[in-house]
Amino acid sequence: EADIYQTPRYLVIGTGKKITLECSQTMGHDKMYWYQQDPGMELHLIHYSYGVNSTEKGDLSSESTVSRIRTEHFPLTLESARPSHTSQYLCASSRRADNEKLFFGSGTQLSVL
Amino acid sequence: GQQLNQSPQSMFIQEGEDVSMNCTSSSIFNTWLWYKQDPGEGPVLLIALYKAGELTSNGRLTAQFGITRKDSFLNISASIPSDVGIYFCAGQLYGNQFYFGTGTSLTVIP
């Protein structure tokens, strides 16, 4: 059973607001990832981290930022939300040893009005 | 980024039928994975494949890593209602990032 948690599950906010999506895992995984997914579509990598103080941008350009100050915590922040940011955001983690096995959180469905 | 094409895009089948879906890429991968996503949840890993030609089973699920390393298929035997969901393939090259397929939506009619 994967122990990776995302909050909030659903978020509806107005344009221009600053938001932080939380992601925590209790498995001690080194690697963590943020994916963006539109309904029924493929997942696109927006950020990843190989460990504490390591963050990289993924293939999909994103106006969000991330931080990795603790192994278990990988929050994603949008400084000024826009309607184009409306999407599902999925956090995932993996061990360094078998990093092909991603464990996903339940996601945050973000709607920006 | 890489593009992984899955087919079919959607399937509507009767309970008890077998299901087959596949995933193709223009690039080679050294690891293929299959995930299932239930509505409102994150994907869950079903099967991981590590070698060209490898055939792996997980209960009623069977997946194969194509010889060319550019494709993979997933079969589900004797489908049941809880098989409903979206199935994603993913490819990975040498421990680097994953690329996910476009998904196959499966509906099982009781």
Image: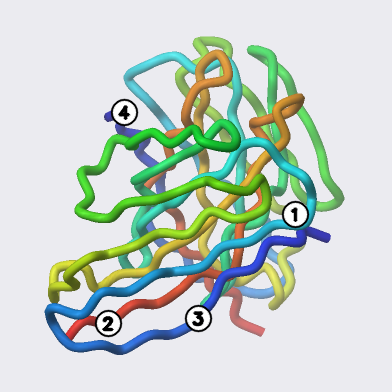
Count of number-bearing discs? 4
Could you tell me the amino acid type at mark 3? Pro
Pointer 2 and pointer 4 on the same chain: no
Residue at 71%, 65% (x, y): give it. B79
Could you tell me the amino acid type at mark 1? Ser
**Residue placed under numbered mark 3 in the picture:** A8
Could you tell me the amino acid type at mark 2? Ser
Q: Are marks 2 and 4 in contact (CB under 8 Å)?
A: no
Determine crowd level at label 1: few under 14, some 14-19, many 20+ residues with C-alpha closer than 10 A.
some
Residue A85 vs residue A80, the one in the foreground: A80
Q: Nearer the viewer, mark 3 or mark 2?
A: 3
Residue at 46%, 63% (x, y): give it. B105
Separation (CA) of disc 4 from disc 1: 30 Å
**Residue placed under numbered mark 4 in the picture:** B2
- Measured as percent of width and height from the top left, residue B41 is found at 57, 71
Determine crowd level at label 2: few under 14, some 14-19, many 20+ residues with C-alpha closer than 10 A.
some
Q: Nearer the viewer, mark 3 or mark 1?
A: 3
- Measured as percent of width and height from the top left, residue B23 is found at 46, 36
Question: Which of the two labelled residues, at mark 3 and mark 2, occupies the earlier sequence position?
Answer: 3
Query: SS of the residue at dot 1?
Result: loop
Query: SS of the residue at dot 2?
Result: strand
- Measured as percent of width and height from the top left, residue B74 is found at 62, 42
Could you tell me the amino acid type at mark 4? Gln
